[in-house]
Amino acid sequence: MDILKYEKLFTSQGYRNIVGIDEAGRGPLAGPVVAVAINCGTSNLIEGVKDSKKISEKKRFLLYDKILKSVVDVGIGIVHENEIDSINILQATYVAMRKAIKNLKIKPDLLLIDGNPADIKDIKQKNIIKGDSLSYSIACASIIAKVTRDKMMVEYSKVFPKYNFDKHKGYGTKFHLKAIYDNNACPIHRKSFKPISEYLPTLKYFKDNKKIRLLSCQIVAEKMIKKNVKIISFNEDFDIVSIKENILIFSSVNTIIGNKTINSKIPLNIVNLDSTIKNFILNLNSGNFNKVRIYNIELELKKDGHKINVKKDDLYDI
């Protein structure tokens, strides 16, 4: 079967900017739903591209890089668990698709969408059942969506290690369900999904300062991941060490709960680069950075949520 059948058909009808759309993450109990809109143009067919669910994780990652290097345009839309809980997973998927289209540089004149019609009104669309197996553009979108989401779940696993998100990516496996039963839900679980709704922790669950400090660090790290920050170290020598672009970020988190303040494990300040930070950098395997920044973060925990205040130090060359 010709996986370019639909692209060739609609190109012959005069369409020039044909975009395939697919999503990943409708079924999991945790994490975001990710949609990708991709314009493959007239790029050469990449061997091995097909429905992402039929490809091994290792091969998906290899194809991910090849696809991004070859396509004309790609837009990614992400809707996180809080919004999923607010509007439901179907509507969240539509929102993610609209975000992905908005993030394209070139407006499409035709959308090829996997499965049922999407709530997208201003662009002509063709819905293709099992489109990720029948359309090259949709298959490419499915791979980019799946790998993008998987990378986020691997980062979340560093912050919430008890749940092994790097293994099951938030789906309801036997291990994942047992972890929820044993530890309650964590901040990235979808609270409107069962059985998550039955295992929501309250502040009373966090009886000691150690648990409260950990929760605060998890909330902060989770928000960093949502902003495409990579976690290097969590709750070890420092509260959080992360990297974005070429900047290595050391974060300390102080927690306010009621009239009580729980201080960071290691309060941070830089005077010509503190020796503790210097030693950490020397022992770090990854060297893709040339500047250091300190975040002193104050997180106030409340019954109805939390408030974060961030004080950033200047950038320091290393």
Image: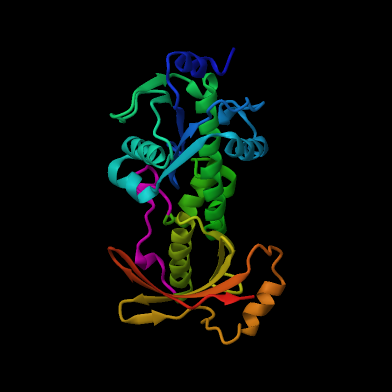
Write down the quadrant of residue 54 in the picture.
Answer: top right
Q: Is residue 292 above or below residue 104?
A: below
Determine whether, in the image, residue 89 is placed left or right of residue 264: left
Q: Please, is residue 288 above or below residue 198 in the view?
A: below
Is residue 71 inside the magenta stretch?
no
Q: Nearer the viewer, residue 19 or 239?
A: 19
| Magenta: main secondary structure | loop
Counting from the top left corner in percent of width and height, residue 208 is at 44, 74
Q: Nearer the viewer, residue 35 or 183?
A: 35
Q: Residue furthest bottom?
A: 271
Is residue 191 on the magenta stretch? yes
Q: Position of residue 42 (x, y in %)?
A: 56, 25
Q: Which residues are magenta?
A: 188-208
For the residue pair 250 and 236, the one nearer the viewer reads as 250
Please say if 212 is above or below 131: below
Which residue shows up at 45% across the image and 16% down it? 10
Q: Quadrant of the N terminus?
A: top right
Residue at image x 65%, y 84%?
275
- Left or right of 202? Residue 284 is right
Nearer the observer, 221 or 293: 293
Q: Quadrant of residue 278?
A: bottom right
Residue depicted at x 29% and y 46%: 86
**Quadrant of the drawing holding the C terminus:** bottom right
Total tally of numbered discs in the picture: 0
Q: Is residue 254 above or below residue 286?
A: below
Q: Position of residue 258 (x, y in %)?
A: 30, 77
Q: Residue 75: where, in percent of width, then height?
A: 45, 40
Q: How is the image coloured?
A: rainbow
